[in-house]
Each structure stands twice: as C-alpha cells, then as structure tokens.
Image: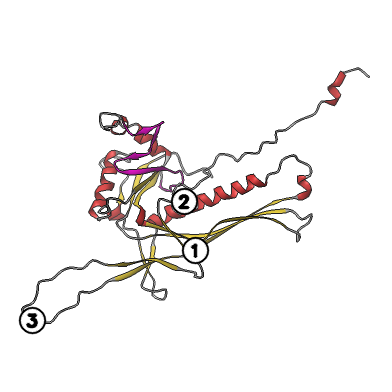
C-alpha cells in the first residue's frame, strides 16, 4: 500500500455557529399603537366613545329644559391564539456540538413579532366590531371612499408613494380632526419600494426643501411631513402590483394582549427519549378604534409579499 502520509486521517469539520435566516425579527409596530392587557374574557371592549353634541337656541324665557341626546358606543376586540412547539431530540443532540435551543427561542420570538404586526396592519382596514354590549354587536366596514387614497392619485396611472399622496393623507386626517391633538404621533407604514420612492424625490432628500439638511439618516427616511416612518414588508398586496400602505394616529388602532409572548423549555417525558420542547404561546387581537384616524394609501409596487 502506498504511503499517503496523514491523508487517510483527514476529517470533515463543520461550524458550530447557528444563525437564523433573513427575516423580520422584531415588531415594528408595538409601541406605535395603543395597547392594553385582558384576561378572563373571550371578547373585550377596550374603549368607549360618546358622540359629539350640538348646542341649541333657547326656546324662550322660562321654557322647559331639554336634555341633549347622548350617543355612546363601544369597540370590541377578540383574541387570536397562537402556539408553536419545537422539539430537540436528546439523543440527536449527543451527536452534534451545536445546542440549538437559544436560537429556537429567538426563532419563535421573531414569529410572534410578525404576528403582532400582521394583526395591527389587518385591523387598520378590517371590519371592526361595535355595539353597546356583547349581546348586540354590529360591524363597521372601513370606508374606502373617504379614507383610501387611490394608486393613481393625481396621475394617469398607478404610481408609487408621492409627496402628493402624503399631503392628501394629512388633509384627510386634519379634516377628520384626528390631528387636533398636536402631541399625538402619526405613523406611516410603508414597504421597501415606497422607501425607495421617497429617496428618489428631491422634496425628501434635498436641503433646499428641508431646513436642517434633509431628512435622510444613513440612507433611511425616519420622519417626513410629520410622519414617523416605519418600513415593513408585511403590508398586504391588495391587487395586482398595488400595495396598501397605511397611516394612523396612535389612538387609531388598539392592540389587546391576553397573553404576551411566553416561551418555556421543557422536558417531554411522554415522548421517546425525553426530548426538549421549546414551547411558545401568545394570545392577542387588534381593532381600529375609529374611522378617520386611519388612512390607507394605495401605491404601485411590484416587489410582492414578504418572503416569510
């Protein structure tokens, strides 16, 4: 036999580094909406409203008083339950130097973060549940005629995000009195394509239009025209090559938490070889609180839905 030195003892080595693939890992919208906790109920009313009143002209000296009508209403939110279990076989783990449990915990947390954002985005334009009590519930559809900006707004065909569309968003919010509270933040949720649209517009990037040298920070538009800008690929594709961006004041959407993210790492003695179970649960739901506080902006977009 030929002497090949140590070649017969060469081995194959693999990295012990375990890393999650590209994905949205944190929630971008928690903190941008109202939030509260609930327990012990299958449906909850997080907020009550009373409608506006109109003053009247007196009917005459010493005439009887008339009570002004009082219009009360409630919004309702129902929980969505989500669970995720990831098993790690104890015998398999003996055969690898990698302990995946910490990354599996992070993987579950990222999935929950996307769940919350998806629910907030859904609730922005979904049909809301209203009614004075749980026994007399009705619904309120999102009014696209009043609170949706067309993809071809001030254009002959569908266009991306433009300053004209943002100006119209502010006009709608002002007309609805949603901006009467000057301290209330306005969030604009856009996709990566709309972010590129903004970077291509001189009104956004040029110091001639922005007294402090523009609004770009390391290539990111964080704030423009009074909007706190959030870039999310979770926005829906509402029709062919058209995405639905959304703008809202903080009190315009409510996120209720029945169970915040909870992960436990448990042994499963009921299964062969007692594997580890990375068990994650959460329960949550969202609703639009009031028409006039949310505006949907349709924009031309060919990038498609998120890849997760």
The residue depicted at 76 percent of the width and 50 percent of the height is 90
Q: Residues within 10 Å of mark 3 (few under 14, many from 20)?
A: few
Q: Quadrant of residue 154?
A: top left
Membership of 102 in magenta stretch = no
> What residue is disc 2 on?
117
Q: Kindly report the distance in space between the C-alpha atoms of the residues bearing marks 1 and 2.
A: 15 Å
Q: Which type of secondary structure does the marked residue at label 2 adopt?
A: helix
Q: Residues within 10 Å of mark 2 (few under 14, many from 20)?
A: many
Q: Which type of secondary structure does the marked residue at label 3 adopt?
A: loop
The residue depicted at 62 percent of the width and 39 percent of the height is 19
Q: Using the rendered image of the protein, determine whether residue 160 is visible from the camera's viewpoint.
A: no
Q: Which type of secondary structure does the marked residue at label 1 adopt?
A: loop
Residue 100 as seen in the image, left or right of residue 269? left
The residue depicted at 73 percent of the width and 58 percent of the height is 268
Membership of 229 in magenta stretch = yes
Considering only vertical position in the picture, is 56 above or below 225? below
Q: Nearer the viewer, residue 127 or 34?
A: 34
- Quarter of the image with the N terminus is top right
> What residue is disc 3 on?
62
Q: Position of residue 87 (x, y in %)?
A: 69, 52
Q: Is label 2 or label 3 in front? A: 3
Q: Quadrant of residue 133?
A: bottom left
Magenta residues span 214-239
- Quarter of the image with the C terminus is top right
């Amino acid at each position: 036999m030929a002497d090949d030195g140590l070649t017969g003892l060469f081995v194959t080595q693999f990295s012990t580094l375990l890393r999650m693939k590209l994905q949205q890992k944190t929630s971008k919208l928690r903190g941008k909406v109202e939030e509260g906790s609930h327990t012990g109920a299958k449906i909850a009313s997080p907020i009550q409203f009373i409608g506006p009143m109109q003053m009247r002209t007196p009917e005459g000296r010493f005439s009887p008083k008339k009570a002004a009508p009082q219009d009360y209403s409630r919004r309702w939110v129902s929980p969505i339950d989500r669970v995720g279990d990831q098993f790690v076989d104890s015998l398999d783990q003996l055969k690898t130097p990698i302990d995946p449990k910490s990354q599996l915990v992070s993987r579950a947390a990222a999935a929950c973060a996307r769940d919350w954002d998806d629910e907030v985005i859904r609730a922005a334009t979904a049909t809301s549940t209203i009614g004075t009590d749980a026994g007399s519930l009705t619904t309120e559809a999102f009014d696209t005629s009043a609170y949706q900006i067309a993809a071809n707004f001030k254009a002959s065909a569908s266009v991306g995000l433009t300053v004209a569309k943002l100006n119209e968003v502010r006009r709608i919010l002002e007309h609805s009195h949603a901006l009467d509270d000057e301290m209330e933040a306005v969030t604009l949720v856009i996709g990566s394509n709309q972010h590129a649209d903004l970077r291509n517009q001189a009104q956004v990037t040029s110091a001639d239009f922005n007294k402090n040298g523009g609004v770009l920070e390391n290539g990111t538009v964080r704030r423009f025209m009074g909007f706190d800008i959030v870039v999310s690929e979770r926005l829906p594709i509402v029709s062919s090559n058209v995405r639905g961006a959304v703008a809202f004041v903080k009190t315009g959407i409510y996120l209720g938490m029945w169970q915040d993210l909870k992960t436990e790492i448990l042994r499963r003695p009921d299964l062969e070889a007692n594997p580890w179970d990375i068990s994650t649960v959460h329960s949550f739901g969202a609703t639009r609180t009031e028409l006039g506080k949310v505006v949907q902006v349709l924009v031309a977009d060919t990038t498609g839905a998120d890849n997760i």
